[in-house]
Amino acid sequence: MTVVPGIRVPAKLPPKACLIFLHGLGDTGEGWSFLSRVIRQSRLIPAEVGNSTCFIFPDAPQLNITVNNGMLLPAWFDIYEFGNPNAEQDVAGFFKTCTTVLKALVDDQINRQHIPAEKIIIGGFSQGAAIALATLALLDYKIGGVIALSGFITPAVAQELEKKHLVKHVNYETPIFQGHGKADSMISYRFGEKTCTYYKNKLGFKNLEFHGYSRVSHGASEEELEDVIKFVKKILCD
């Protein structure tokens, strides 16, 4: 079993699906654990489906964040400069999280819980979204889908990802939901659009839908969360 700290919400029925969602910089898994309640309580999701889905909200390790003068913060990788995609990047830390955290958790659900890979959804917010998108490109088996809220990819990570992206067909049709606030001053809306273009046009992911949300900053609105639930329903209820 992969031991990653965080919030785990077990299925109330025999598990048939799993959602793994990574938080953003400075947050914890608890900060996004409400998604399990929102999804299970939604009228859009049949009760049996919601109750047979388990949820994992991992906690990032404490890292000395360069842009914050070395302050210890929960983070999936170091940040050297805000708002500048061309700044130095923690490429090694980024891909370490992809493989030793997110991919390891997916493997664990498949091998230990015997959940079908195509009923596993990975996702995240901000840093977590960046990790989820890149991890999809690294997998050598098909999963259910990806939720990327306020996500991004930097040039240095993109360059390395193209070298690692060896299995160029397995998840090309996998549904991807990318949501971004149009008033986001931390990760600009335009940066989100460029990320979408990169994954669709450069890497070839065909089933990526990009949604923008007016007057939403670096966070998620009720409208966005409702769209996320509809996206989850399409995957889990097919």
Image: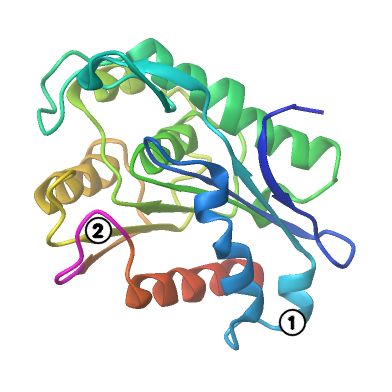
Q: Is residue 161 visible?
A: yes
Q: Residues within 10 Å of mark 1 (few under 14, many from 20)?
A: few
Q: Residue furthest bottom?
A: 43
| Alpha carbons under labels 2 and 1: distance apart | 29 Å
**Span highlighted in magenta in the image:** 213-219
Secondary structure at badge 2 equals: strand
Image quarter (top left, top right, bottom left or bottom right) of the N terminus:
top right
Give the residue drawn at x 60%, y 88%.
43
Image location (x, y in percent) of residue 79: 27, 22
- Check disc 1 and give the amino acid type: Ala
Residue tagged 2: 180
- Check disc 2 and give the amino acid type: His
Quarter occupied by residue 128: top left
Give the residue drawn at x 26%, y 40%.
152
Residue tagged 1: 47
Give the residue drawn at x 79%, y 60%.
16
